[in-house]
Image (tube, coloured by chain):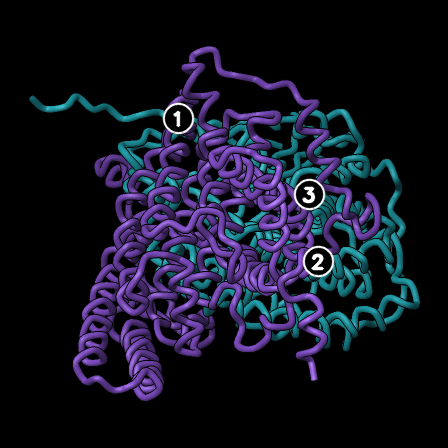
């Protein structure tokens, strides 16, 4: 019934489901006009970049409002609601205010590093989008090592945080920088090893290939790899400096961490880049684990890029939710969590997945048989490991009950009386 | 060749997001560990004790609002008790019950703030503090209904309270005490007390041993967390606390987590006291007639109340004139803070912030 209707748009430039038709039309026209091949290559790249960057710019503006509004709801208050309808113009006001502010720079800060850091922090979050597929034919740079590129880029952001913290010449900033480096060293490992499971299953590092694998096998990667999803989610939220792992900017401890000394639009860049990084990580999770633009049969009707944006915002909501809910870990607890739990889990996951892929290939049976089996096995494994962790390996803080005792029911302790002389003899220590 | 290292001195405060005012903590830090802590107080010193010598006894009541501005009622109450003791003034029954009701409501408000701010110090992103504010606002609404002010209430008077409660007060209090706050405390229990991250952050952090607690003259939740059941309301009852039934929550380990759970439990006990006080609330006058420029006889008096922070004592000396000859305040914030060094040395910066939050200082009271 839908088929004749779909025929009306399929393959034409007004086909919203696939914006690549539009660009293909433009390239064809340019070719007709006799532009050389290399210039068409350049122009197509520019067009795609323009689209992505404008999308990210819009997202950064809108997400300021989204995050403040959603968190406001969680905090039983309204959030920004004065400027424009529903307070939608609040980000504009924020930006104007930040631009008007004087940019103060510590006299002892090395100017170049100090200036470059916010820019270097912003770039990776945007650059990640180059390899992310938006639709069946919509991917700007289809790299064979797309995942490797993403991992490299996300590490770069952490390096720029270190640049900012180090160059500010401020003790709080230096603390933030040190913490970031400690965290980078610890959390890169579970991230990489955890994602290895995804790569083993898909057999490719190309993100489009990973999406197509999920389409072929009719299952989201999060079903096949729930453990990898959990590991990646926790680890990347640490790398993103979001609660419960925002130790690098820990407001209540080290004021602002690495961006203590930044003001004006330099701070604004950090602020925006934090939102952009969250969105780009959401996009990575949506692509790797939630099928990207593919959504069973739905992507035949709804544009794939809309499905993709919907998934991105779903994951982004998870990030906002954890941020609005959880307190912060201490740095040693955070690092212990990476080394004692996430890394071993990631290694177990890789071993299991490798065995499964081997069995799959050797048996010669179809994916239709193996995929449900793997879903069941990996789901059970994840459940067992999480329950086991909570039961046996979680630190024992339950030595005492969570409810206090009551006076009429307890004995008053009889304490040895300490004289003033004894007290002083012990150096004033009781 | 060994690398030369030396501890870094970091100023935590006076302008820091989590010093609860303008308190300065100079921490000497080796990596993330704290080697030494120096406390610098006095940024909010307003010389209230000296100023009080120039004002009449009644005019001094607003000063007590502005000391612990999060528990103004307790300050009012403690001061009025001391002057009444000095001048030997009989307070009507109704006023005593109203004082208990408002003192306990103030305890709920202050502990709400303390709990929320404590979890904020643990690093939660404003959410718990906002939820606690929601419940605190409900209490403050009742204050506003009664005496027109929310924070600096200036409600107690020498010889009673300033105003009788309005007609709509008791229904609103009933709704608050029997419906809204118990539900809110259930939420706290679910979301805060059972939270593993809070446990990891607060257990064994900022431990006070019973010996240290007694020797340092700590009071309030700080002392009770160390396992010592000492509460002025039981030990030296004032107003009509000797007629109330309530329990004193006592901790196990003397750490920050115990202090938090004790505060949450104390709020529940406060509700219990309020229910009893409302049930027994007698009629009659809310105030005895005391001259505005009261001239107590020559002498001195010390009276203490269990403020949310601990033992709040007022020492008043009169030379027979209309103003106190000497006025001294035993501020629990200052004395509870005095063990900060013992509590924080050897821990990390993050722990020090959590410890400071769990002491629940109020710099207005600390510096006076």
Q: Nearest the camera: B263 or B131?
A: B131
Q: Nearest the camera: B167 or A54?
A: A54
Residue depicted at 64% across the width and 18% down the height: A102
Q: Mark 3 and mark 2, same subunit?
A: no
Q: Nearest the camera: B218 or A337?
A: A337
Question: For residue B204, what is the image quadrant?
Answer: bottom left
Label 2 secondary element: loop
Mark closer to the chain start, 1 or 2 = 2
Q: Colour of chain B?
A: cyan
Where residue A331 appears, as percent x and y from the top left, is: 34, 47
Residue depicted at 58% across the width and 44% down the height: A27
Residue at label 1? A171
Q: Is residue B325 above or below residue B142?
A: above
Residue at label 3? B69
Residue depicted at 69% across the width and 80% down the height: A2
Chain for disc number 2: A
Q: Which mark is residue A14?
A: 2
Tell me: A411 left or right of A249.
left
Question: For residue A430, what is the image quadrant?
Answer: top left
Q: Is residue B331 above or below residue B320?
A: below
Comparing labels 3 and 2, the label whose residue is closer to the camera? 2
Where residue B256 appears, as percent x and y from the top left, is: 42, 55
Distance from disc 3 to disc 1, alpha carbons, whole Å, reads 33 Å
Chain for disc number 3: B
Tell me: A249 left or right of A375.
right
């Amino acid at each position: 019934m839908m088929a004749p209707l779909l025929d009306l748009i399929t393959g034409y430039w007004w086909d919203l489901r696939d914006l690549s038709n539009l660009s293909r039309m433009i390239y064809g026209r340019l070719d007709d006009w006799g532009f050389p091949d290399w210039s068409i290559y350049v122009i197509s790249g520019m067009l795609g970049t323009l689209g992505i960057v404008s999308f990210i710019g819009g997202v950064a503006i809108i997400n300021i409002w989204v995050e403040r509004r959603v968190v406001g709801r969680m905090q039983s208050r309204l959030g920004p609601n004065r400027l424009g309808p529903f307070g939608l113009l609040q980000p504009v006001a924020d930006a104007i205010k930040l631009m008007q502010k004087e940019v103060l720079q510590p006299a002892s800060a090395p100017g170049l590093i100090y200036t470059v850091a916010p820019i270097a922090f912003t770039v990776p979050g945007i650059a990640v989008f180059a390899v992310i597929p938006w639709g069946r034919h919509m991917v700007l740079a289809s790299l064979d090592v797309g995942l490797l590129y993403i991992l490299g880029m996300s590490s770069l952001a952490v390096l720029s945080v270190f640049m900012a913290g180090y160059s500010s010449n401020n003790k709080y900033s230096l603390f933030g920088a040190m913490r970031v480096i400690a965290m980078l060293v610890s959390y890169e490992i579970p991230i990489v090893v955890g994602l290895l499971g995804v790569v083993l299953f898909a057999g490719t590092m190309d993100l489009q290939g990973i999406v197509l694998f999920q389409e072929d096998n009719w299952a989201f990667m999060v079903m096949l790899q729930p453990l990898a999803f959990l590991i990646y989610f926790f680890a990347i939220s640490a790398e993103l400096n979001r609660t419960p792992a925002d130790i690098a900017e820990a407001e209540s401890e080290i004021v602002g961490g690495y961006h203590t000394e930044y003001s004006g639009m330099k701070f604004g860049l950090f602020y925006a880049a934090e939102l952009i990084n969250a969105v780009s990580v959401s996009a990575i999770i949506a692509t790797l684990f939630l099928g990207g633009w593919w959504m069973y049969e739905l992507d035949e009707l709804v544009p794939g890029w809309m499905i993709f944006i919907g998934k991105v915002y779903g994951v982004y909501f998870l990030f906002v939710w954890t941020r609005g809910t959880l307190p912060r870990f201490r740095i040693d607890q955070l690092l212990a969590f990476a080394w004692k739990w996430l890394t071993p889990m990631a290694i177990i996951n890789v071993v299991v997945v490798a065995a499964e892929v081997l069995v799959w290939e050797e048996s010669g049976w179809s994916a239709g048989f193996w995929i449900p089996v793997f879903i069941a096995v990996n789901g059970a494994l994840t459940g067992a490991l999480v329950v086991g962790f909570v039961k046996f390996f979680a630190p024992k803080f339950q030595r005492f009950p969570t409810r206090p005792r009551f006076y009429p029911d307890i004995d008053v302790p009889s304490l040895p009386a300490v004289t003033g002389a004894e007290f002083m003899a012990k150096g004033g220590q009781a | 060749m060994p690398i030369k290292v030396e501890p870094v001195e970091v100023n935590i405060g006076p302008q820091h997001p989590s010093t609860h005012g303008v308190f300065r903590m100079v921490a000497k830090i080796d990596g993330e560990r704290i080697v030494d802590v120096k406390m610098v107080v006095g940024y909010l010193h307003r010389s209230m004790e000296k100023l009080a010598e120039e004002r009449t006894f009644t005019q001094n009541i607003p000063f007590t609002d502005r000391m612990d501005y999060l528990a103004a009622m307790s300050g009012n109450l403690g001061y009025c008790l001391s002057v009444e003791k000095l001048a030997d003034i009989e307070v009507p029954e109704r006023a005593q019950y109203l004082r208990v009701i408002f003192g306990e409501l103030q305890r709920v408000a202050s502990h709400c703030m303390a709990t929320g701010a404590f979890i904020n110090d643990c690093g939660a992103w404003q959410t718990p503090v906002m939820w606690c504010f929601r419940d605190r606002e409900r209490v403050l609404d009742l204050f506003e209904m009664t005496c027109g002010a929310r924070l600096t209430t200036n409600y107690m008077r020498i010889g009673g309270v300033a105003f009788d409660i309005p007609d709509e007060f008791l229904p609103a209090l009933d709704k608050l005490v029997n419906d809204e706050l118990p539900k809110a405390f259930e939420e706290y229990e679910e979301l805060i007390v059972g939270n593993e991250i809070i446990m990891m952050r607060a257990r064994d952090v900022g431990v006070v041993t019973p010996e240290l607690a007694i020797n340092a003259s700590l009071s309030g939740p700080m002392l009770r967390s160390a396992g010592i059941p000492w509460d002025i309301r039981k030990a030296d009852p004032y107003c009509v606390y000797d007629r109330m039934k309530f329990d004193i929550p006592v901790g196990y380990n003397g750490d920050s987590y115990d202090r938090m759970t004790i505060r949450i439990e104390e709020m529940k006990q406060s509700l219990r006291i309020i229910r009893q006080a409302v049930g027994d609330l007698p009629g009659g006058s809310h105030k005895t007639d005391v001259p505005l420029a009261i001239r107590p006889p020559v002498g001195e008096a010390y009276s203490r109340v269990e403020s949310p922070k601990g033992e709040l004592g007022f020492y008043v000396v009169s030379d027979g004139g209309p103003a106190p000859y000497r006025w001294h305040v035993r501020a629990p914030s200052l004395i509870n803070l005095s063990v900060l060094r013992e509590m924080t040395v050897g821990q990390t910066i993050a722990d020090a912030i959590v410890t400071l939050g769990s002491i629940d200082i109020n710099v207005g009271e600390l510096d006076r």
